Image (spheres, rainbow, N blue to C red):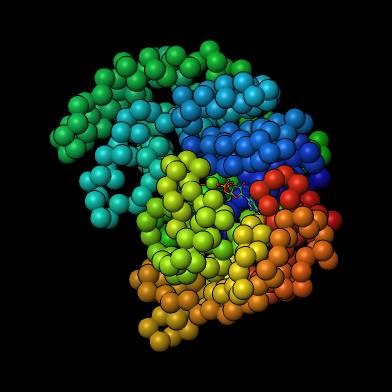
Amino acid sequence: MPVIVLVGAQWGDEGKGKATDLLGDRLDYVVKFNGGNNAGHTVVIDGEKYALHLLPSGILSPGVVPVIGNGVVVDLNVLFQEIDGLEARGIDTSRLRISANAHVIASYNRSLDKVSERFLGARRIGTTGRGIGPTYADKMNRIGIRVQDLFDESILRQKVSAALLTKNQVLSKIYNRSAVKAEEVVQELLSYVDRLRPFVADTALELSNAIDDGKVVLCEAGQATLLDVDHGTYPFVTSSNATSGGACTGSGIPPTRIDRVVAVMKAFTTRVGEGPFPTELHDERGDYLRKVGHEYGTTTGRPRRIGWLDLVIGRYAQRINGVTDFALTKLDNYDGLDEIPVCVAYEVNGVRHDEMPVNQTDFHHAKPILETLPGWKQDISGCRTFDELPKEAQGFVEFVEQRIGARISIVGVGPGREAVIERHSVLGS
Ligand code: GDP
Ligand code: IMO
Ligand code: MG
């Protein structure tokens, strides 16, 4: 039975949560392997909306064991708020497993995220302010706090004090903020221990055993290919590996056990935060897509930046992630358009680029070369098979498929769980 990795193809918010939910009743485990509560996944079930940040989207499927892998950074306050919110709506969260090796977001890292963004001024990244970057920086600097540290009070105290040795200097002397008291941080973290204990496990071992037993495992990325710290539009990225390689390091599942990679790609492009965006629209057409697509951040509520579909990015995502199947979402948001421009290549200083320019300056200067496809001007949200789609919509899907180098197996035609066309099974057949 397969192990599937599900990633975002663009700059996030492609509809990964909905795609995971769609597969939910065919899965045994859903593993979040990177990021933290910078993610925001909206899943709509029977008209009820669920916004998930830290918990894997699989938590909404009754048969699934949701796993927070070692590659995730965990804000414990957010974790228990999210658990309480779901429990209050009748969702059972007791199956959740959390890696003992996942890192914990301490309060000082939330403060540092916000204050460093303010100091960067015009050069800011536009982060979500959740402490994600500073927590991953601590992990790499080997001064991070891991979930397992909470179960040894003396170790926890030593680690927090060690981290604060330099951080308090930075907070007070560079950013003019008050120093943080180690004991307050320790007490806050200890206050979660009793609730945390039943969830904590050697998740890499559990997943290995589950795969041996033939269980179906889906590794669900937060963020997306162009927000990946190695392969994205650095420095305007998040601080983790959101591409398929991150699924291995962030879960402990080795590459030899991955069977399929599904990339979720929105039929247009959005971006939250700063950074280059070649197909960005600054006119009423962008405003229109933002309105029909309800494109406002799930995490911060910021209006998302909007642009045409970019197939240079689609091809890049296919190559970097080794995509076997794409899910093309939000095709229905084009229902009202006469024609649909799509970016097929870039022009940079008079030179055509069919692949992502390796040089960041070139990407900043890239102008989209657009091809225009006909619209269908009708409501497609009720279509459930490819043949039911208007010819123009079929043509759009096939055009995109030819250019990105992997089949489009799922087409999203509305926000609800049912509003989807499955052309091929992404579970292998
Ligand atoms: P994620 O971060 O990748 O999980 O995506 P978000 O949940 O942040 O943003 C995707 C939004 O699009 C959510 O509001 C979904 O309910 C919605 N959505 C997903 N697929 C479709 C689709 O095919 N059509 C429409 N109209 N909305 C969709
Ligand atoms: P999902 O999983 C869209 C963006 C932020 C910012 C940059 C760095 O819902 O697709 P961070 O707080 O991670 O250090 O911010 O990354 N960003 C996202 N944009 N969707 C997300 O997650 C994002 N997570 C982070 O806006 O530009
Ligand atoms: Mg999102």
| Image point (62%, 73%), residue name | 338
| Image point (77%, 55%), residue name | 382
Does residue 23 lie above or below 391 as drawn?
above
The answer to whether 165 appears left or right of 341 in the picture is left
The answer to whether 236 appears left or right of 80 in the picture is left
Q: Position of residue 428 (x, y in %)?
A: 80, 54
Q: Position of residue 331 (x, y in %)?
A: 66, 61
* Depth check, front residue: 380 or 365: 380
In this orientation, does residue 24 appear? yes
* Depth check, front residue: 371 or 287: 287
The answer to whether 181 appears left or right of 33 in the picture is left
Quadrant assignment for the N terminus: top right
* Depth check, front residue: 401 or 247: 401
| Image point (63%, 33%), residue name | 67
* Depth check, front residue: 2 or 402: 402
Q: Position of residue 294 (x, y in %)?
A: 54, 50
In this orientation, does residue 230 appear? no
Q: Quadrant of residue 335?
A: bottom right
